[in-house]
Image (cartoon, rainbow, N blue to C red):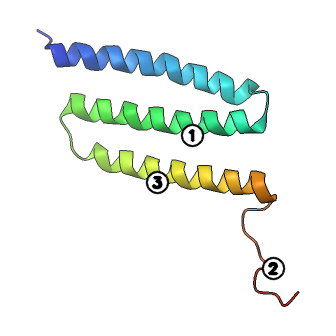
């Protein structure tokens, strides 16, 4: 017999799966590069939510470390892509030069 929590988790996983498909479509066909980057960031957040729901379903605390890791990587990727859009480079090598 399923508990109410199991039903809610399964429903949430299904909704997140369809939302992730929408974000993948937006990443592929986004009209601008900015839309694609926002879709990539949103996809990372949805992936974190999906892993957290699986961790609740399996009653495992070890998957929460994976959620934190995905969050950190998504944040760093978003910052790097935003800097690339703003300046055209991610790492500036000429910062210490005397020019």
Task: Give me the disc on residue 41.
Answer: 1
Residue at 65% from the left image edge and 56% from the top image edge: 80
Residue at the extreme right of the image, as rendered: 99
Q: Residues within 10 Å of mark 3 (few under 14, many from 20)?
A: few
First-in-chain label (1 vs 3): 1
User: From the viewer's perspective, is 77 left or right of 36?
Assistant: left
Residue 77 is situated, as x and y percent measured from the top left of the image, at 60, 52
Quadrant for the N terminus, please: top left
First-in-chain label (1 vs 2): 1
Give the Cα distance between marks 1 and 2.
29 Å
User: From the viewer's perspective, is 16 left or right of 12?
Assistant: right
Residue at 54% from the left image edge and 33% from the top image edge: 43
Residue 96 is situated, as x and y percent measured from the top left of the image, at 76, 86
Asked where in the image residue 5 lies, by quadrant, the reply is: top left
Q: Under tag 3, what secondary structure?
A: helix
Task: Give me the disc on residue 72.
Answer: 3
**Number of disc labels:** 3
Q: Residues within 10 Å of mark 2 (few under 14, many from 20)?
A: few
Give the Cα distance between marks 2 and 3.
27 Å
């Amino acid at each position: 017999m399923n508990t109410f929590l199991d039903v809610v988790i399964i429903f949430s996983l299904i909704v997140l799966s369809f939302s992730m498909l929408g974000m993948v479509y937006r990443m592929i066909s986004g009209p601008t590069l900015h839309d694609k980057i926002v879709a990539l960031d949103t996809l990372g957040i949805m992936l974190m939510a999906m892993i957290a729901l699986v961790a609740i379903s399996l009653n495992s605390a070890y998957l929460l470390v994976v959620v934190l890791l995905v969050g950190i990587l998504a944040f760093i990727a978003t910052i790097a892509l935003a800097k690339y859009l703003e300046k055209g480079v991610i790492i500036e090598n000429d910062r210490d030069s005397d020019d």
